[in-house]
Image: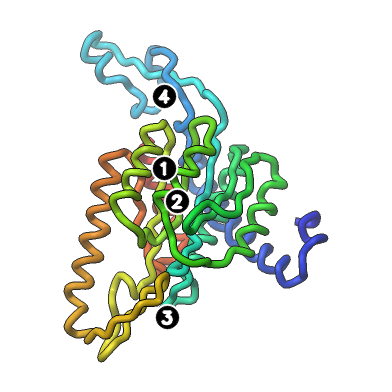
């Protein structure tokens, strides 16, 4: 941190320190508890079978081989390359929203991204950062050296929302940047055209990239806690519409539930991890629960 602090205003350096400490606490607690990474098994290819030996993970047993031979074999894998991770953060205006939580959707995304950047550096895997609204914006090229972490944290603390979003177009641009298989971690409220977005995500997946979608909504966007007459405003276009809360609440909640369920189904079918979160959930607890569930699947 010393090197980066020499070039920053004291208040910005303090923000980076706080973000760094938050990330460290999340990741160190996770790694100490499990003694394993949730991201092993991405950039690997099948090599050969070998006989099962005491101490091998039973999850690696090839049951097809057992059915044919009556003997236990495990699949042996070889690493291709270090996993390259891109953290992709939505900077559309709607990400700046909060009703009564301390963190906006963007703040929440930044905390998650910082923890994952720290985890990747701990694994000595290259990690980079890209941002987008209607197109790709600021970026930090992937690196695995330890100096990469303060570089990413510095960029994260300076992020600000812009205007509207075109997630599908931004994902197409991102795909054109990628030179080899990567892990794409997307942080967005996904308030964009659904069909083009899903198509762009599927195309990335079909190109061999692994994708995690953190769907970040504000607590109020999920629970609709409002009462009385409201003026609902589209944060990206500025258009407003008068609504009576009591008349809209049930239909709104059903719409959000259906939206999340539909995304879960569509993305799961494409083997894309879908992680729906809202800003009332402590980000460290939410991230740890996801990492644990992911590790148990691989």
Marks 1 and 4: which is nearer the front? Answer: 1
Q: Which residue is mark 3?
A: 100
Q: Secondary structure at mark 3?
A: loop
* SS state under label 2: strand
C-alpha separation, residue under disc 1 versus residue under disc 4: 28 Å
> Is residue 122 rendered to the left or right of residue 108?
right
Residue 107: x and y in percent read 52, 67
Kind of element beneath mark 4: loop
**How far separated are the C-alphas under marks 4 and 2?**
34 Å
**Closer to the camera, 226 or 284?**
226
Point out residue 23 in the picture as x, y percentages from the top left corner: 58, 57
Q: Secondary structure at mark 1?
A: strand
> Contact, CB < 8 Å: mark 2 with mark 1?
yes
Inter-mark Cα distance, 2 to 1: 8 Å
Q: Tell me whether circle 3 and circle 2 mark residues in contact (CB < 8 Å).
A: no
| Residues at circles 4 and 2 in contact by the CB criterion of under 8 Å | no
How far is the residue under mark 3 from the one under mark 4?
49 Å
Among numbered discs 4 and 2, the one appearing first in the sequence: 4
**Residue located at (24% from left, 48% from top):** 265
* Identity of the residue drawn at 36% across and 74% down: 234
Residue that badge 2 annotates: 186
């Amino acid at each position: 941190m010393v090197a980066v602090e020499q070039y920053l205003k004291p208040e910005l350096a303090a923000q980076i320190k706080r973000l760094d400490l938050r990330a460290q606490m999340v990741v160190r607690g996770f790694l100490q508890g499990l003694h394993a990474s949730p991201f092993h098994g991405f950039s690997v290819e099948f090599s050969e079978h070998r006989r099962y030996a005491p101490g091998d993970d039973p999850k690696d047993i090839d049951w097809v081989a057992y059915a044919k031979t009556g003997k236990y074999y495990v699949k042996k894998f070889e690493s291709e390359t270090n996993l390259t991770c891109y953290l992709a953060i939505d900077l559309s205006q709607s990400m700046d929203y909060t009703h009564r939580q301390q963190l906006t959707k963007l703040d929440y995304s930044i905390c998650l991204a910082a923890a994952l950047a720290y985890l990747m550096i701990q694994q000595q895997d290259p990690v980079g950062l890209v941002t987008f609204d209607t197109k790709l914006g600021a970026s930090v090229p992937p690196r695995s050296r330890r100096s990469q972490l303060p570089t990413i944290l510095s960029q994260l603390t300076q992020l600000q929302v812009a205007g509207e979003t075109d997630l599908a177009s931004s994902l197409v641009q991102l795909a054109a940047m990628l030179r080899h298989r990567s892990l794409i971690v997307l942080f967005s409220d996904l308030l964009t055209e659904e069909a083009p977005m899903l198509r762009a995500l599927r195309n990335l997946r079909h190109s061999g990239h692994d994708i995690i979608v953190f769907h970040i909504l504000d607590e109020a966007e999920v629970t609709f806690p409002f009462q009385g007459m409201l003026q609902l405003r589209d944060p990206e276009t500025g258009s407003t519409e008068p609504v009576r809360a009591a008349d809209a609440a049930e239909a709104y909640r059903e719409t959000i539930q259906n939206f999340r369920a539909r995304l879960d189904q569509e993305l799961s079918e494409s083997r894309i991890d879908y992680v729906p979160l809202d800003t009332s959930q402590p980000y460290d607890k939410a991230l740890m629960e996801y990492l644990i569930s992911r590790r148990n699947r691989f």
